[in-house]
Amino acid sequence: MRKCTIAISSVNHAIRSEKLLTRSGIGVKLVKLQPAATKKGCAYGLELNCGNLSAALSLLQNAGIPYTEVVR
Amino acid sequence: MIYFDNAATTFPKPPGVINGIISCMSSYCGNPGRSGHALSMRAAEKIYDCREAISRLFNVSAPTNVVFTPNTTYALNIAINAFARKRGHVLISDVEHNSVYRAVASLSRIGVDYDIFTVDPYSDENTLRSIKNRLRSNTSLLVCAHVSNVCGITLPIEKIGGLCKKYGVRFTVDAAQSAGTHPIDMQKCNIDALCCPGHKGLYGPQGTGFVVFSDKYSAEGAASGLTPFVYGGNGVNSAEKKMPDFLPERYEGGTLNTPGIAGLSEGIDFVGKIGEDNIFRHVCSLFDRSAEMLSSLPEVEIYHPDLKGGCLLFNVKDMDSDTVADLLNDEGLCLRGGLHCSPLAHKKLKTQKGAVRASFSYFNSPSEAEALFRAVKHIAKNK
C-alpha cells in the first residue's frame, strides 16, 4: 500500500489530527519530518495510506486544522 | 504555619501535583514540539493532554486554543494586546487588578483610551447600565475580573458577555480568582479570551497560567488578526521570520514549562474529582466562620462580609494592615496586607491605605479559622 504524509507544522495540531483521524477510523503514524521536506521548515507528519488521503484532508479541513502540504 | 494567602497562590498542593512534576522531571522531560524522539513526543503529548483538560473545563472545542503562559498577568497582556486596536477604546471595571489596569493603561502608546465602569455587587442591572453608559462607537474590548482578588465581589460575566455580543465588543475575562471554584462556560458567556492562573484555584505549580481563546479563533487563518506578543522559536515553520498565524504557537515562543504543565494537569484532575462546587462551598464555610468570629471584635472592621467567597478583607482599627500581617506572621499565620496589586478595588472599598486579606483553599480547616480569630483578637487587644 502506497504511503502519503500530511505535513503539519505544529506538534499540537499534529497530535490533535492524529486523535481526530484515529477516532474516525483512519490509521495514521505521527512522525517528525526533515526540515527540507516542507517549504516552511520544521514540521511533523501524519503517515497514512494514500487511499485514505482525501477523507483525511476533508476531516482536517472541517476541523479547521492547518496543515502545510501533502508529501507523497 | 497556617496558610491563608491562597488568593496569591494556593498552598499546599495536592500530592498528585508534586508527583506529576517529579515524574516529568525524572522520566520524560524532553523539549516538546522540537524533535521527533520519544522524550520530546511524550512531553508534547503530556502538554496536549493538559490543553484538552482545560478546553473541557471551559467548554471550548479546540484544545489548540489553549495558550500556556507563566501566569495570569502574562495571559492578560497577550489577550489585551491581541484585541487592542490603534485609537480604539477599552472598558475595564473598578475592581481590576493591576494586571488589567496597567496593561490597558499602557495602550495609550498606540492611542487607546479607556474608561472604568462601576460594579454594583448588589445589582447586575446597575453594573450593565454603567457599561452601556460608557460604550463608544470605537469600543473594541471589555476586560474584567470574574471575581475580585480582595473580597467577594463577583461580576455577572454571562450578562456582560451578552452585552458585548450585542454591541460587537470583544470580551476578555480575568479568572485569576474564579478558575477552579466557579464553573465558566466560555460559549455561554460569549468570552473571547479567558485568562487563568495554573497555581491558584487549579492547584498547579507557580510558573503556570494560560489564556484560552474562543472557538471563533480556531479556524484556519482566524488568529492571523491577533497581534503577536512574544517572538521567537517554537519548532513551527522555522524557515519563516513571522510567528505562525494559528494558535497556540502564535503566542508560544520559547520552551514551555513542561514540568509545571504536568503538575497543572494533576491539579485540574484534583479539582475535577473534588468538584468546583464542593471546593467553593468549603471556602465559603471558612469565610462565614471567620467573618462571624471576627465581627464579634469591636476593633475589627470587615469589608463586605455579606459577599461570600475565597477572600475575607478586614482591618484592625488604628493599625496599619502590613503591621497586622507581620504580627499574624509572628503568631504563625500567613496573610497579606497592603493593596494586593488592586488600587482600584481598594479605592472602591475606601481602603486606600490597605487592608488584611485572609484567602482560603480546600486545604484549610475550621480549626485554622478559629486560630485566625484568636490571633487577631490577641493583636487587637494588645495594640
Image (cartoon, helix red, strand yellow):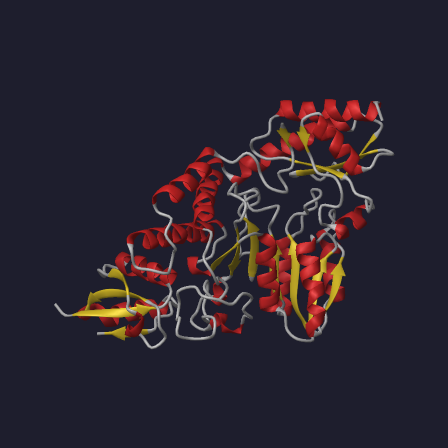
Can residue B62 be seen by looking at this rendering?
A: no
Q: Residue at x 60, y 46 (%)?
A: B178
Q: How many marks?
A: 0
Q: Residue at x 29, y 53 (%)?
A: B38
Can residue B355 be seen by looking at this rendering?
A: yes
Name the residue nearer the viewer: B274 or B356.
B356
Name the residue nearer the viewer: B47 or B180.
B47
| Above or below for B235 versus B206 | below
Image quadrant for the C terminus of chain B?
top right
B340 lies left or right of A23: right
Residue B220 position within the rendered picture, expressed as x and y whole percent measured from the top left: 42, 71
In this view, which residue lies farthest toward the right?
B318
Name the residue nearer the viewer: B208 or B167.
B208
In this view, which residue lies farthest toward the left?
A1
A71 lies left or right of B215: left
Residue B187 position within the rendered picture, expressed as x and y whole percent measured from the top left: 52, 58
| Above or below for B380 versus B358 | above
| Above or below for B340 versus A25 | above
Residue B249 position within the rendered picture, expressed as x and y whole percent measured from the top left: 45, 64
Q: Residue at x 39, y 71 (%)?
A: B237
Image quadrant for the N terminus of chain B?
top right
Name the residue nearer the viewer: B240 or B354.
B240
B34 lies left or right of B229: left
Residue B212 position within the rendered picture, expressed as x and y whole percent measured from the top left: 51, 57
In this view, which residue lies farthest toward the bottom?
A39
B60 lies left or right of A53: right
Location of residue B41 by image quarter: bottom left
| Above or below for B92 versus B358 | below
